[in-house]
Image: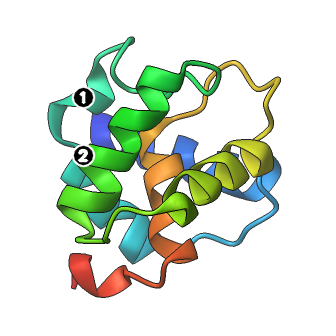
């Protein structure tokens, strides 16, 4: 098993145990690949759920640029909801897991089709 496969398995475990979701492994794999080399960088692989600037980056770079969603209050509401589901006290909120949940939330799986 390669490094990326190990990370995908870790993300799937987080979705099952911390977020109470059954992951769509095909979509999770595509979202992980879409994160590029950031999944191997200790700082870049996680989302700081308590930093407004980090959450704005998720909104601007992922929701608006990648998923093509128009700006609006519902974007930050969705980010906050996903952080809440993952667990505010959870120290490592993996970017690929957050992006996966946001993709599912907005029904934008086709972006990774």
Say whether marks 2 and 1 touch (CB < 8 Å): no
Residue bearing mark 2: 61
Q: Is residue 39 visible?
A: yes
Residue drawn at x 49%, y 28% is: 47
Q: How many marks?
A: 2
* SS category of the residue bearing label 1: helix
Please identify the quadrant where the N terminus is shown. Answer: top left
Q: Is residue 101 visible?
A: no
Residue drawn at x 30%, y 52% is: 62
* SS category of the residue bearing label 2: helix
Q: Residues within 10 Å of mark 1 (few under 14, many from 20)?
A: some
Q: Is residue 102 left or right of residue 57?
A: right
Residue nearer the viewer, 36 or 53: 53
Residue situated furthest front in the rendering: 72
Residue drawn at x 45%, y 63% is: 72
Q: Is residue 107 above or below residue 21?
A: below
Residue nearer the viewer, 103 or 1: 103
Residue nearer the viewer, 65 or 107: 65
Please identify the quadrant where the C terminus is shown. Answer: bottom left
Q: Which mark is residue 64?
A: none
Residue drawn at x 55%, y 51% is: 76
Q: Position of residue 11 (x, y in %)?
A: 54, 46
Q: CA distance from mark 2 to mark 1?
A: 14 Å
Q: Earlier in the sequence, mark 2 or mark 1?
A: 1
Q: Is residue 24 left or right of residue 111?
A: right
Callout in the foreground (2, 1) = 2
Residue situated furthest top in the rendering: 43
Q: Is residue 20 above or below residue 56?
A: below
Q: Position of residue 100 (x, y in %)?
A: 47, 61
Q: Position of residue 43 (x, y in %)?
A: 38, 12
Q: Position of residue 17 (x, y in %)?
A: 80, 50
Residue bearing mark 1: 38
């Amino acid at each position: 098993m390669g490094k990326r496969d190990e990370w995908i398995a870790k993300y799937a475990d987080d979705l099952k145990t911390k977020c109470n979701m059954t992951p769509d492994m095909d979509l999770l794999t595509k979202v992980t690949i879409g994160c590029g080399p950031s999944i191997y960088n200790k700082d870049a692989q996680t989302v700081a759920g308590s930093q407004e600037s980090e959450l704005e980056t998720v909104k601007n770079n992922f929701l608006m640029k990648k998923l093509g969603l128009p700006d609006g209050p519902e974007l930050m509401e969705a980010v906050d909801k996903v952080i809440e589901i993952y667990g505010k006290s959870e120290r490592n909120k993996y970017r690929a897991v957050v992006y996966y949940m946001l993709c599912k939330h907005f029904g934008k799986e086709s972006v990774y089709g």
